Amino acid sequence: MLPCRESARLIAVSYERPLGLWENLKLKWHLRACAICQRYREQMELVNRALSRVSDLIVTDEDRLSDDARRRIAGKMKLEGE
């Protein structure tokens, strides 16, 4: 079974990008058996929704990164994570 630490990582990653088929299956299987990780995912969802609402209120279009800048940052983060 997937360790809780890896489950938490996949939950966080799922807010940045879609999970692959295997990642998604492993996470779903783990969440069926682990109430703690289920609760963690629920909490992350609440935090994510709250932050989205707040950022919509205080961040203007001028403050947002361009799609190109987002791709470059994501690419650098991926390289550093390997």
Image (cartoon, rainbow, N blue to C red):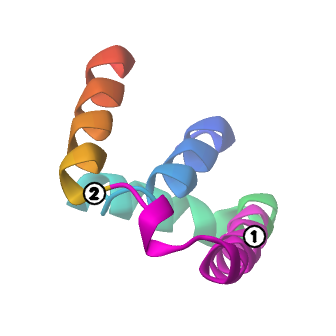
Mark 2, residues whose alpha carbon is within 10 Å: few (<14), some, or many (≥20)? few
Report the residue at 28% width, 57% height from top: 66
**Image vertical order of residue 29 relative to residue 16, above or below:** below
* Contact flag, marks 2 and 1 (Cβ < 8 Å): no
Q: Is residue 24 magenta?
A: no
First to last magenta residue range? 40-65
3, 63: nearer the viewer? 63
* Foreground: disc 2 or disc 1: 2
74, 21: nearer the viewer? 74
Q: Is residue 57 magenta?
A: yes
Q: Earlier in the sequence, mark 2 or mark 1?
A: 1
**SS type, badge 1:** helix
Circle 2: residue type: Ser
Mark 1, residues whose alpha carbon is within 10 Å: few (<14), some, or many (≥20)? few
Residue under label 1, please give it. 47
Circle 1: residue type: Val
Query: Measured from the top left, where is residue 50 in percent x and y?
Result: 75, 78
**Image vertical order of residue 79 relative to residue 66, above or below:** above
Residue under label 2, please give it. 66
**SS type, badge 2:** loop
How many tags in the picture? 2
Report the residue at 60% width, 81% height from top: 56
29, 80: nearer the viewer? 80
Q: Quadrant of residue 32?
A: bottom right
Q: Marks 2 and 1, how far apart in space?
A: 24 Å
Q: Identify the image quadrant of the C terminus.
A: top left
